[in-house]
Amino acid sequence: MIIILEPQKDAYVTNINTRENKGIEANSGNAATLDLFKLYNENKFANSWAIFQFSNSIEDGQVLVLKDANGVTKTFEFDNNDSVLNNNIAIVGSNNGNEASLIKAAIEAESDFAINAYVDSNNTLVLKQKKSGSSGDTSFTLPTNMTHSYNLSSFARIDYSACLVKFDISNFKSEWITLSDAGALQGSFENLQAEIVLKDVNTGITKPKEFRVEALKMLKDFDEGIGKDTIYFSDKGPCNFTNLDSSTNNIWEIPGIITQADADSISSDFYVEKGNEDIVLNVTDYIKQQLVNTTDKGFLIKLTNEFLFNNKSYFAKRLGSRHLTNKKLVPELRIKINDSSYHIPISSFNKIRFLNNNESFYLFNKVNGQLSNFANPAGLDTLKFKITNKDNDTDLITPVDASSNITNLRGQQLSGIFKATVNVSKFEDNISSLIKNNKLEANYVWYWTDDGTNIKTVKTQRVDFVISETQESFDFENLISVIKIDENFISSDNSVTSLKVYFTDTRKEFDAVKVPYELPSENLGNVHYQIYDVETNKVIVDYDNSATLMFFDGEKYVFDVFIPKIFKDRRINFKFKYKDIVTDNEKYIFNEKYSVRII
């Protein structure tokens, strides 16, 4: 199953300047798109800047040569003595992990120098020309152990944006997650996969391509805001690239720059190759951490530094925001779980059992419409399961203990269900002698006991085991799918709808009075489903190796579908995929005439 969350809030921030406005003060929280872009030396209203990092301390005598937009050049020399060496400006201090602060202080002391200096808490130095335009695109000379990000050799006018998006992970956790006593994820969520999907809404001919974006985790809260102007950036207020919200604590450490104090890596990136594709970011590890200990403040999506600090422009990758009228294009957080192994067969009238195969049997205790814990007979504390001959007077296998450790997909213990799994071997003498026409006629027996002497039988029922399927069982000629929905409709209320599917070979002979879904489905092995929008023919839930795997209960295929509110009013259909067991080719089944409206 794939659980889809829409954002609580989203926006984008930018450092771009226009003729009249500063982008770092602008809000776009109510805009229809999330614009992801980067401009290199294209904006005459922008101020050139550079960002520097330090690998080790800088030795005495090393120099930093800078030129401002007015043509003034100054040389700064590192020295432990408070003096000017060779007419250079001394940068004095211990020079041990505080290089950025020392350089900042030296630059600020030069009153005739038109460069501003900024320092973050990770000893990163940002230098910005005070004068806008190309005159600030000056080169510099760096000392040893000081590097400019990705080796740009000059100041540059880099205008860029970053998308902010927040999903309600806390509410999802309260509705879906059950933690173990040790605080770990349980059930199908133990091996969940999670991804952010940002939908491309570009309609222009030119689309930026061949760049990589990454997801970072926000370390500070942000307000969405109500700004809409993404042309002139005239709407002021948080969140913007100066203030994330109205709180004085939630500000960017350096306005217009993303530092490690603002966001941190979660090792997720995506390469935009063609320009019109959706952005899909794997955030599995981060989501797992948040479901155990929710501290999530949202995601930040931007170009990776490799592309942010190169000499190319990428304008503009437009992605749908949550404010779009067309809800098909809003951002999504997709939680993928393999729930097929948590389905329990309840009404399988035609389950075929096989020799030399693990076969599971279930015992249910339903009282007044509810599953209730079993009341074992006095003195008998063990429920066992066995296979006997058809006359029920000889045990064919060693009895096995029944297990009550049955959980749902959330990892919650289920009451009133026992399970036993057996493997009946056709090679045992007492069994092989009973096999007639490739079939063993037998019974299964549930019973309470203590040490094996006292026995109280709970249930006995006929069961047959066959050696293998015949060729007719997997030689399909004309399969059709018949879909049955328990609720007879699909509601878009963030709930789960159960579906049953029967795959019927129309070339086979069946009783003419039976309608298709009264016939047992063919067993096709592993079958996966896909959901597509009938009106647009676009896939909205694609095949996934684990999350769209259907469960075969012996009579039919069963799967659950999570329907989010953003699917409302869509008309959908299903396609099914399985593998031919002989050729290993993938085959597809779907009924083009079928569709169902989500209300």
Image (spheres, rainbow, N blue to C red):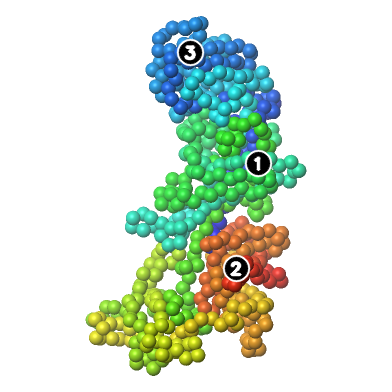
Q: Is residue 134 left or right of residue 384?
A: right
Q: Nearer the viewer, residue 263 or 50?
A: 50
Q: Looking at numbered disc 1 in the image, what kind of residue is underneath it?
A: Glu
Q: Position of residue 388 (x, y in %)?
A: 37, 87
Q: Is residue 105 above or below residue 578?
A: above
> Which residue extends farthest right?
205
- Of mark 1 and mark 2, the one earlier in the sequence is 1
Identify the residue under disc 1: 210
Answer few, some or many: residues within 10 Å of disc 3's Cα (few below 14, many 20 plus, some between 14 and 19).
many
- The answer to whether the residues at label 1 and label 3 have Cβ atoms under 8 Å apart is no
Judged left or right of residue 554, residue 451 is left
Residue type indicated by callout 2:
Asp
Secondary structure under badge 2?
loop
The residue at which mark 3 appears reads as: 77
Q: Quadrant of residue 413?
A: bottom left
For the residues marked 1 and 3, what is the alpha-carbon distance in whole angstroms? 40 Å
Q: Label 3, secondary structure: give it.
A: strand
The extreme bottom residue here reads 391
> Identity of the amino acid at label 3?
Glu
Label 1 crowd bin: few (<14), some (14–19), many (20+), radius 10 Å: few
Q: What residue is at 57 percent from the left and 38 percent from the top?
A: 304
Question: Front-most of 327 and 587?
Answer: 587
Residue appearing at x 69%, y 33% in the figure: 232
Instruction: From the image, tell me which residue sits under label 2.
Output: 584
The quarter of the picture where residue 270 lies is top right
Q: Is residue 353 above or below residue 570?
A: below
